[in-house]
Image (cartoon, grey):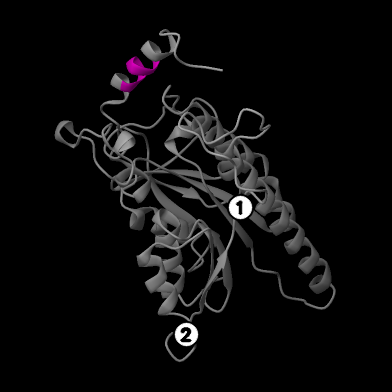
Amino acid sequence: MVLSVAGKTAIVTGAGSGINLAFSRLLLRKQCNVVFADLALRREAEEVVAAHLSPSRSPARAVFQRTDVREWPQLESSPASRDPRDSSRYALIDINLTHPLRTTQLAIAHFLSHRRRTSSSSLSPSPTKQIIHISSIAGQTTPLLAPLYNASKHAISGFVRTLAPLDRHYGIRVTAVAPGVIDTPLWRDNPEKFRLVDEGSGDQWVSVEEVAEVMGVLVGDGGREEIEVIKGSASEEKRMVKIEGGLILEIGKGKIRKVEQFNDEGPKGAGNTVGKMALVDGEILEMLGSGNWGI
């Protein structure tokens, strides 16, 4: 069955910037309507939405829905942490993990409800339903700098693999991309993070467009059943892998690699390195031993 996203509607959380903005642009080019679900839109995202507000301007519609994916009151902030001492939650975990789990739950419930309503009245097979998550190479590595971020991405990868059987049994395909170091405002607008990248010593950026293109393939546009990946982190040889539930694809600079569940060799090469990470790890260890950290 040749699939197409044209005429369908995608809800994209975090579409106000970065990878998911690029993915939204790709979907709109393919005539798929997009709901931009985010707290706010950067200027470039506002321009995209404005260009797709009415059918007379574009065959695909774009709508901004202000969305706080945490769904609870804004957390207090302090110089030391975004999370108050009397809180039982971490903002990063709520955004990076709880929110994807909740939206997946809602999507599965909707897909199954629709399946029950249509199965008795239709003789043709139902198209595969798609849920795609953004993991990271941090779902494989463990830099000391970002323990909560690492934990959230390890959890997303495990979550996606756990739901693999839904593809075979119910036609609900849950997959993920695991990007390397992406050229987004999350790096460019954060001096503390940006100083870690050592472009002079070989660190390279992966573009948001590279990630979006792979996401487009994973959601099934064009009906591709396989995708070409490199055989290993240090290899230029290619192989084809089946697109199916539980698949996680690492995206480096100019290359795609399947992340294996067991005995994976880990991310290496262009787009997967942050040259000054060890320096910051040393600073953290020194701070922890100074007596000036903690509660």
Circle 2: is it few (<14), some (14-19), or many (20+) Cα within 10 Å? Answer: some
Neighbourhood count class around disc 1 (C-alpha, 10 Å): few under 14, some 14–19, many 20 upward: some
**What element does badge 2 sit on?**
loop
Q: For this view, does 277 lie left or right of residue 78?
A: left
Locate the N terminus and report the quarter of the image it occupies: bottom right
Task: Relative to 124, say whether 250 is above or below.
Answer: above
User: x and y percent of residue 9 in the render?
Assistant: 58, 72
- Of 114 and 49, the residue lying toward us: 49
> Is residue 173 shown in magenta?
no
Q: Nearer the viewer, residue 120 or 151?
A: 151
Identity, as a three-letter code, of the amino acid under mark 1: Val
Residue 265 relative to residue 273: left or right: right
In screen coordinates, is 148 left or right of 98? left
Q: Are marks 2 and 1 in contact (CB under 8 Å)?
A: no
Circle on res. 59:
2
Q: Which residue is mark 1?
A: 69
Q: Which residues are magenta?
A: 280-284
Give the image location of residue 258, x and y in percent: 45, 41
| Residue at the spot 55% in from the left edge and 38% down from the top edge | 92
Q: Quarter of the image containing the C terminus?
A: top right
Label 1, secondary structure: give it: loop
Q: Please identify, in this view, whether the residue under mark 2 or under mark 1 is nearer the observer.
A: 1
Percent from the top left, x then y, of residue 181?
34, 41
User: Is 283 within the magenta?
Assistant: yes
Q: How many marks?
A: 2
Give amino acid for label 2.
Pro
**What residue is rendered at 44% in x and 27% in y?**
141
User: Between residues 172 and 108, which one lies in front from this camera angle?
Assistant: 108
Q: Residue furthest left?
A: 200
Q: Main secondary structure of the magenta part?
A: helix
